Image (cartoon, grey):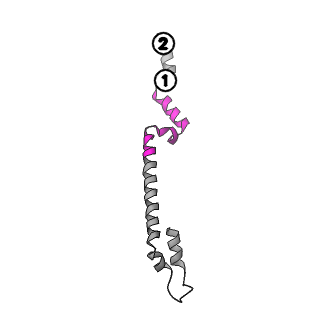
Amino acid sequence: MEHFISLAIQMPARLDSPTGDYLVEIKDQFQLFGTIQRITNNLDEIESASSEFLDQYSDIAFLWENDLETSFQEFLNQGPDMREIFLDKLAK
């Protein structure tokens, strides 16, 4: 709807009069502004529902946010070095 209004503003002159623009007629259309409000409300509801949906999976977001190879290497670096444990057992 904003694009529609911006087009009405950009028209240099009316065909039926040498001066003026179409903006007055656009602003007089309350139905147009009601439609804009409904669209805005629907977009707000969609945004809210999308946010709630994404929040359900925020605890496992690392599955698609982190690189698999990097995550696996971090996992390996956190644990004990199994080679050292094996060599310690052989030495005993």
Judging by the rendered image, the residue that carries numbered circle 1 is 81
- Closer to us: 79 or 37: 37
Amino acid type indicated by mark 1: Asp
Q: Is residue 44 above or below residue 87?
A: below
Q: Start and end of the magenta stretch?
A: 52-80
User: SS at mark 1?
Assistant: loop
The mark found on residue 1 in the picture is none
Amino acid type indicated by mark 2: Lys
Tell me which numbered mark, 1 or 2, is placed earlier along the sequence. 1
Where residue 7 sits: x, y (%)?
54, 74
- Closer to us: 79 or 39: 39
User: SS at mark 2?
Assistant: helix
Q: Is 14 one of the magenta-colored residues?
A: no
Q: Is 73 one of the magenta-colored residues?
A: yes
Farthest residue, direction front: 31
- Closer to us: 18 or 12: 18
Q: Residues within 10 Å of mark 2 (few under 14, many from 20)?
A: few
> What residue do we see at 46% from left, 24% from top?
80
> What residue do we see at 46% from left, 26% from top?
79
**What is the magenta segment's predominant secondary structure?**
helix
Where residue 37 sits: x, y (%)?
43, 64
> What residue do we see at 52% from left, 20% from top?
83
Judging by the rendered image, the residue that carries numbered circle 2 is 89
* Contact, mark 1 vs mark 2 (Cβ under 8 Å): no
| Cα gap from disc 1 to disc 2, whole angstroms | 13 Å
Q: Residues within 10 Å of mark 1 (few under 14, many from 20)?
A: few
Where residue 62 sits: x, y (%)?
48, 39
Farthest residue, direction bottom: 18
Where residue 29 sits: x, y (%)?
46, 74
Q: Is residue 79 above or below residue 46?
A: above
> What residue do we see at 45% from left, 29% from top?
78
Q: Is residue 10 above or below residue 39?
A: below
